[in-house]
Structure formats: C-alpha cells, structure tokens
Image: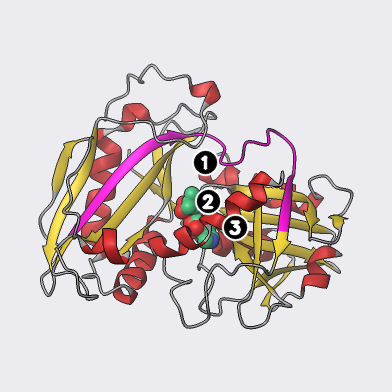
C-alpha cells in the first residue's frame, strides 16, 4: 500500500468530496451476476438523460470508513454489515444483488489504491462511498436492464460544523422522511432527496438538522436525515425500533452492543414518544458520518428544550469514547468488528 501521504491539510478536513486517484466501476445486466469490474481513474462518468437513475431514482448507496489506527494499520469497521445492508437495499430497489466477496473486493481494492489519501492517525478517516444505480434508458416507469456499481472515496473530518458544541435540532411533523412499508429502511437515494427541503429549512432557521417523526404515528420519533437517534431516560438507553421506515444503522447496532456489553446499560429498541425525547437526560445521534454526536437542545415550533444540562451527556461521551477507541485500535476489539487491510 502507498504510505507516502498526499499533501492535504489534514487538520482542517470537513465532509466534502476530495478527488482521489481511482474509483471502482463494475457493470451488470438484470438477471446476471456481478462479476466484472476494475479500478479506473477518479473522474466524471457519462449517463444518458433517459437513464433510470436520473428519471426514477433507481439507486442506492452505502457509507463506511477506513481508519489509520494506533497500531499503524489500515482497517475497515464492520464492512460485512454494509455489504449485507446493500444486498437488502438493492433487492428492494430491483437492482441485481451482489455477493459479499464482490463488494469486499471492490471496497478493499479502492481503499488500497488510495491509501495515501487516508488521514494520519487521529486526523479523520477515508470515507468510502459505494453507489449502485440503473443506467439503461427508459421513459416508462420500470426497472433498468443495465446497472453500474462504483466505489469512490474521500478523506473526511467532522460531518457537523459545530466544533466542540452539542447539536441544536429541530423537531417537526411538517415533513416526513419515509413512510412505513416504503423504502425508508433501504439506503435508497430517494430517501435523501426527501430530506433535502426539510433539512435545509431547519438549517436556515439556525438548527443543525432535523428530527423526523413517524409518518403514521406522529407522536413517536424516527431518526434524522443521516443518523439514528438515542435517548437516555430514567437510566435506560432507548432507540427507535426498526419498523421498516428507519435505517438499520451499523453505528446504531455498535452503540447498542457497547452500551449493553461494556457499559452494562439497559438498552431498549422501542417506540419513543416525543415527550420522552424532550425530557430526556441525554440525547445523541449516531452514524458512520456523524460518529456519536451529543444533542444539547431540541426546538419545536412552540418551544426550545434544553436536554440534560445542555452539554454533552456523560453516557454519550463514554459510548463515543469506546466506539472511537475500538475503531482506532486504541483498545482491544472484543466483538470482531475490525477488518484490517494491512
Ligand atoms: N440513518 C440514516 C438515514 C443514514 O443515512 C445513516 C447513515 O448511513 C444512518 C442512519 C446511520 O447508519 P450507519 O451507522 O450505518 O452509518
Ligand atoms: C453515512 O453516515 O455514511 C451516511 O450515509 C450519511 C450520509 C448521507 C452522509
């Protein structure tokens, strides 16, 4: 692997795409297997204006990270979970399903060829973005006959531009992100376009992001546009149960395991009423991009609520610390989550 690092301002990484050397591209026809694919130079791709992804949103993606760890190794975090979720997302979106080996070959080849773009230990990570979409032309609404799978990467730092401050989130039932029995639990690109308008409205009002409520029962919370939610209430750690309209986050699952097995907390996947969220002792969101980020305030159209003492909660910080320590190999990984590349 290439060890001479690129000249990048590692101390000021945000969450913006920085072009790297190469990206993976594979192609597959409906009914065939994903077998071919290779690294090509990073750059633009061409698409027909009639391609299915542009007209009907037939596309899904994944997100995972490569870390340069304290042991001076390059590792991935639970990539098998991303592969499994991608299989579910592709199936739901009528895209040919790829096997774990094909996914892992594409991801590891791309990371290895761009390893000099991985931030040094303690300075961020390499975000890995697998994307898969229908490219054949159609005007009638129907699944494509031809598909492309790509993997590109970018060095990244923090997702939220809040420095060391907790988040101030906006809770509203004016817009829903996803519906029960819809595609909310698939990492389908359409879920993210649904969140653009509410998300930018929240940001224009000065909030960091938006909390969505359940589309059928607006009294309970769901998740954010790019992260799952946790609430510490009466000594228990609660997170919305997977009911089909929220994403089955890899970080969510890791937080549940760390809280139960390392911190001996009672964790419940359950319905969380808005009142319980707003009176919680701690609230945090989690995801690959956002890691674990504490929430200090939540506002509705009527009122601003301070969560706990308005700062990062004690359990939030402990859970975040343990997760990052495992990801950076600062402590042993008791769960077999680390996938070393060197
Ligand atoms: N929820 C949504 C809508 C997301 O986009 C993400 C990010 O992937 C998550 C939750 C967190 O998932 P993960 O921890 O797998 O990154
Ligand atoms: C991730 O955390 O990897 C995500 O996919 C969220 C993203 C939309 C930034």
In this view, the residue in front, 101 or 10, is: 10
Identify the residue at image location x=23%, y=35%.
42
Type of colouring: secondary structure
Classify residue 85 as left or right of residue 251: left
Above or below, 256 relative to 340: below
User: Would you name the residue on which mark 2 appears?
Assistant: 333
At mark 1, the secondary structure is loop
Quarter of the image where the N terminus is located? top left
Identify the residue at image location x=70%, y=55%.
284
User: Would you name the residue on which mark 1 appears?
Assistant: 329
Q: Earlier in the sequence, mark 2 or mark 3?
A: 3
Q: CA distance from mark 1 to mark 2?
A: 7 Å
Identify the residue at image location x=72%, y=43%.
206
Q: CA distance from mark 2 to mark 3?
A: 38 Å
Mark 2 in CB contact with mark 3 (< 8 angstroms) = no
Q: CA distance from mark 3 to mark 1?
A: 37 Å
Q: How many marks?
A: 3
Classify residue 114 as left or right of residue 256: left
In this view, the residue in front, 258 or 273, is: 273
Q: Position of residue 97 (x, y in %)?
A: 24, 70
């Amino acid at each position: 692997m290439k060890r001479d690092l690129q000249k990048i301002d590692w101390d000021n990484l945000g969450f913006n795409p920085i072009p790297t050397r190469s990206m993976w591209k594979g192609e597959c026809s409906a009914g065939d297997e994903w077998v071919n694919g290779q690294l090509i130079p990073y750059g633009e791709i061409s698409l027909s204006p009639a391609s299915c992804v542009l007209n009907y949103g037939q596309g899904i993606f994944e997100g995972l990270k490569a870390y340069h760890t304290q042991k001076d190794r390059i590792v991935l975090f639970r990539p098998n979970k991303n592969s499994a979720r991608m299989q579910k997302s592709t199936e739901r979106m009528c895209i040919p399903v790829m096997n774990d080996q094909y996914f892992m070959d594409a991801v590891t080849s791309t990371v290895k060829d761009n390893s000099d773009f991985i931030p040094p230990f303690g300075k961020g990570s390499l975000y890995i973005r697998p994307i898969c979409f229908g490219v054949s032309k159609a005007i009638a609404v129907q699944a494509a006959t031809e598909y492309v799978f790509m993997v590109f990467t970018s060095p990244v730092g923090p997702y939220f531009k809040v420095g060391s401050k907790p988040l101030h989130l906006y809770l509203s039932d004016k817009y829903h992100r996803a519906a029960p029995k819809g595609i909310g639990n698939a990492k389908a690109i359409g879920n993210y376009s649904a969140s653009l308008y509410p998300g930018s409205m929240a940001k224009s009002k000065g909030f960091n992001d938006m909390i969505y409520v359940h589309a059928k029962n607006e009294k309970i919370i769901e998740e954010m546009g790019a992260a799952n939610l946790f609430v510490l209430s009466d000594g228990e750690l609660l997170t919305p149960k997977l009911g089909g309209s929220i994403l089955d986050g890899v970080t969510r699952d890791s937080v549940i395991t760390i809280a139960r097995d390392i911190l001996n907390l009672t964790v419940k996947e359950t319905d969380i009423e808005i009142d319980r969220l707003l009176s919680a002792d701690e609230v945090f969101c989690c995801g690959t991009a956002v890691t674990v980020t504490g929430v200090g305030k939540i506002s509705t159209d009527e009122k601003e609520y301070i969560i706990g003492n308005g700062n990062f909660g004690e359990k939030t910080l402990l859970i975040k610390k343990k997760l990052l320590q495992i990801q950076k190999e600062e402590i042993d990984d008791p769960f077999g989550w680390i996938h070393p590349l060197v």
